[in-house]
Image: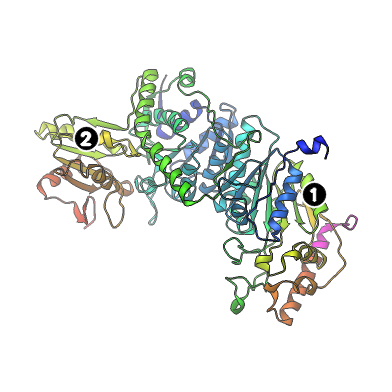
Amino acid sequence: MSEQIRAKRELFIPGHYGCPGCGATVAMQQTLSVLGEDTIVVMTAGCWSSLIGIYPYTCLTVPVVSVAFGATASVAAGIKAGLTIQGNDHTTVLAFAGDGGTFDIGFQPLSGVVERNDDILFICYDNEAYMNTGIQRSSATPAGAWTTTTPDSARKGQRKKNMVEIMAAHRIPYAATASIGAPEDLKEKLEKAKNIKGSRFIHLFASCPTGWRHATELSIEVARQAIKSRVFPLYEVFGGDTWQLSSMPEKEGVDAYLKHQGRFKKMSVEERDRMQMRVDDDWQRLINRCQAPRAVG
Amino acid sequence: MKKVMMGTEAATMAVKLARVQVVSAYPITPQTVIVESLADIIGRGELKAKYMPVESEHTAMSSCMGASLAGARTFTATSSQGLAYMHEMLHFTAGERVPVVMVNCNRALAPPWNLYCDHTDSLSQRDTGWIQYYCADAQDVLDAILIAYAVAEQALLPVMINLDAFYLTHTSEPLDVPDQETVDLFLPPYHASLKLDVNDPKTFSIVCGADLFSSIKYKRQGDTLAVARLWDQVAEKYNSHFNRLHKTVEAYRTEDADLCIVSIGTATGTIRLAVDRLREEGLKVGSLRLAMIRPFPLEGLQRAIAKVKHVIVIDRDVSFGAEGIVAQEVKAGLFGHRGDLKVTGFVAGVGGNDVTVDTIIPLVRQAISGYGNAVEAGMSLWAEVLP
């Protein structure tokens, strides 16, 4: 190991409290590896507020504040304002929230921050339910999925909210989807986001073996299948109106994505067909918006 | 310099003199003058600060907390429903130990909707850990905000400065505006001892176990209690610069009084007029204004009523199912200290009902005789209730 590498501080050190195969830890590791030491992290109630550690232990060596559930974006914007007025124009303020803290309870402050174009990077690590409190549905949970509040007797009927579309409607300078299943693409997007001024939003797909009921060693595979089956397409939106597809996966049915996950086990053939139809519709809608895709990733 | 100003303008002037660095606020009647004029002052560059026109009070408090954690001096203002909407973040800000200063314009809580003076909004937030100060007049507003920053930054606790809706927010009064140079001497720039800093990374407010949790809360309780004395010390220092004293309690003609009327906010001025009138009739009456409610100024209260036989509390608020909140506080403060003391609690002036000399005198007579128009509801007597 060269001196240069040795001297570099590890930002995510061993000892997190996450479940085996946790996608959210991969999301943070990848994020900090690009953003670097000059980063302040704001996190909220959710998996990360638990898995960071219990005082006096922490697995992150950057400054961190863990705030009230709905307040990730607003505290982050305040920190940035406080830094800016004191002459610090370089530190990245990263708001890092789960889907509950983004799609649901954190939605209004996020909308406010993005509308004002406050200079923060908001990353939603999306594991498609309230996993930290024991797998309750969120507005990011896909239709047909089992959770403890959408049990088999009443599985979720509503579709997943499209957060990037909503962010784009705010004319946010940069919004993108990304996945722990596509690390190179994620790094590229983080680099871009790091160097853009104003509000930036990355919707980061982070599989959850505990909540999705799949084998712990399949986290990355499941995330890849979500991309391949076009269930979770990778794309970017610049300034709210230039849409760019990040990859053009071969068309593969949703079955390959669903088959490893216990949360979809009780889906009927009709439900699967409906899901396939919705995925195809959404894909077409996305393609219609996008410019010619760049090289397949 | 002498100027004629409304309470809200006095607050804006204090924020400017305090060289606040981040203002984050959401408009609500009757606080709007403050946020509008701060937007303009900052927009014109008269105050070098970042103005955040946020989408809610929850965000106003969250962003003030964030900016304060980054080491900036911060300010927000709200009222009534807005304060209630902040509730979660009030707990959080106090627990995070950041010195945010906020103006709250005391206005009634809905329903039914009502824009006028009532203290239930802030008094129902008294368990959040914020220091609470209630102003008597516009001069008090300006001075107390400057004192509040000095206290908050020393104690590392947030301070809420309360202004009676309209009686104080929208009434013009002549007041002394201190010069910037002297204010700078009194209130130097804020240097946060602990903050979010990439060069000195620290982790704030993650999960902690029960043993440490109770120790952290115990420490905070001690630090909060100490603010009663700290405020008075800082107020003396302010007095030495500006020749105006704003302490945690303010007694009026209590030295030889048998009867003392306790109140908060602007009603105190009127109560003093009533005291003078009753004295002319031979009644030995005094008045005590509790400027601070949290921490509760126990020593000041006990000193002021040491020889008093009967305390009357006039509350512009109520804790439903109990009684007036200030009455509860006073009783708790006297328990085990003055068991012989009679306490009569009135609820008067809620939702903007005027508390005039002619309101107060009959209440005092009723407290003494047991007969009058105020009607009983549990332990409190309600004035101004329609038949």
Q: Nearer the viewer, residue A128 or A286?
A: A128
Q: Which residue is mark 2?
A: B287
Q: Nearer the viewer, residue B305 or A245?
A: B305
Residue A93: percent from left, percent from top: 66, 42
Residue A132: percent from left, percent from top: 59, 60
Q: In the image, is residue B199 above or below residue A145?
A: above
Q: Which residue is mark 1?
A: A187
Residue B255 is marked as none
Which segment did they paint magenta?
A286-297
Q: Specify whether residue B132 is in view.
A: no
Q: Specify whether residue B214 is in view.
A: yes
Mark 1 burial class by Cα count in 10 Å: few <14, some 14-19, many 20+: some
Residue at the farthest front position: A1
The amino acid at mark 1 is Lys
Question: Residue drawn 60% across and 75% down?
Answer: A151
Circle 2 chain: B
Q: Is residue B274 left or right of residue B118?
A: left
Residue B372: percent from left, percent from top: 14, 50
Q: In the image, is residue A97 above or below residue B174?
A: below
Mark 2 burial class by Cα count in 10 Å: few <14, some 14-19, many 20+: many
Q: Quadrant of residue B294?
A: top left
Nearest-to-viewer mark from 1 and 2: 1
Is-magenta flag for residue B149?
no
Q: Is residue B117 left or right of residue B340?
A: right
